Image (cartoon, rainbow, N blue to C red):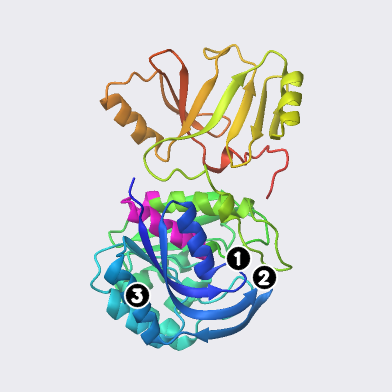
Amino acid sequence: MSVPRILIIAGSDSGGGAGIQADIKTVTMLGGHAMTAITAITAQNTLGVDAVMPVPAEMVLKQIDAVLGDIGADAVKIGMIGSAETAEAVADRLGGLDIPIVFDPVMIASSGSVLADEATIAAFQRLIAIASVVTPNEPELSALSGMEIRGRTDRDMSVEAVMDRTRCRALLVKGGHQLAEGQTHEVEDWLFDEAGNEHHWRAARIETKQTHGTGCTLASAIATYLARGWDLPRAVEAGRTFVRISLREAPGFGRGHGPMGQQAVRLDAPLGDEPVLNQLTLPTADYEASTRFYRTLGLSQIVDAPPRYARFECPGGATLSLHLDERAFAGATVIYFEANDLDRLVQRLEAAGLAIDSMPQDQPWLWREARLRDPAGNPICLYSAGENRRFPPWRLDRRD
């Protein structure tokens, strides 16, 4: 599997929570090679931004030219741009590239600090026009459209205004700053494209202050998946999973809006179409003895459903389950391979001549599973669980 090359054009965050630092961590954890053109140097921490020093546009272009002239790139992620002059210069330089460009129109930090003045925001229009997708939250969408957003109708009008005015190809409107209508504990994201297609994701809100760098992380994840050749909706869905697990894994640093835990997302985000081995289920005849054994061994128990089921988390992110069950696979170790697109994987395996015992089905434990056996009769589960493998709603030490 080739390593995708991601050119990141963004500002530096001295606290390591957002900007270039969050971008590099995200691209690296998703198996990519991160390269940078730094647009601004900031002095900031979890409490706010103390100072910003824009990098001259000429130096930003020299960084871009140095990277593209030697290493090349498979995708570009643009974040904090620094100045209107830099926005115009970057748009000129990237306009002829035939690779995905993800533009996160950074205007305000999680702490509330302003990171783009009116002239810079006005210059964003040229970057929007060359981007494959633009990823504003609702306040940023309001600033881009010049319209107040008080509900879904206002949001849709704002999307239409931005897309018409800027020739934008796709807008991902992030709902983290707003509560879904009628859903006080959920968050919605909407993807709109120039063909009139809409995609919608809704998930439980993760209640945490450790949100510094969410937008940067999502945009960089999307860019990395697009660089692998994924279509945009699939890249957004996988990027959202990466962000949500990073939120749950936040280390809790600082006294304000703390950094996320990108470094802990290892086996939760399969990098391509190849399935990832990240879960085993072992049979047990004695629930108490078995759970006591694995706790003593050093594993962290995350699900406790006596007398039939327990799940443990290992350092590095793999999980192990114990199951007392009379079903077809009872008495055997079941190997679990997670896939980003389970249905597509099953279709490929069927086309290759493998027999599928159980086609993909949604399960009450929030996994989607398919079952088969290897030539020796060993049971295999192919599945997709996203954050619910390590962070099910019933997790013992639930981190939301």
Name which residue type carries label 1.
Answer: His
The answer to whether residue 216 is magenta is: yes
Whether residue 287 is situated above or below residue 262 in the rendered picture: above
Q: Type of residue at label 3?
A: Ile
Mark 1 nearby-residue class (10 Å; few <14, some 14–19, many ≥20): many
Quarter occupied by the N terminus: top left
Q: Is residue 127 magenta?
A: no
Considering the numbered disc 1 on the image, is that residue within a helix, a strand or a loop?
loop
Q: Residue at x 46, y 73 (%)?
A: 10
The three-letter amino acid code for the residue at tag 2 is Thr
Q: Are marks 1 and 3 in contact (CB under 8 Å)?
A: no
Magenta-drawn stretch, dominant element (helix, strand or loop) = helix
Give whichever of discs 1 and 3 has the lower sequence position.
Answer: 3
CA gap, disc 1 and disc 3: 26 Å
Looking at the picture, does residue 396 appear above or below residue 225? above
What is the C-alpha distance between the residues marked 3 and 2?
29 Å
Q: Position of residue 152 (x, y in %)?
A: 49, 62
Residue drawn at the location 63% of the way across and 51% of the way down: 249
x then y, percent, for residue 186: 59, 52
For mark 2, what is the residue? 46
Determine contact: label 1, label 2, CB under 8 Å: yes
Residue 243 percent location from the top left of the image: 53, 54
Residue 64: mark in rendering: 3
Q: Which residues are magenta?
A: 215-234
Is 178 on the left-hand or right-hand side of 220?
A: right
**Of the pair 61 and 304, the residue shown nearer to us:** 61
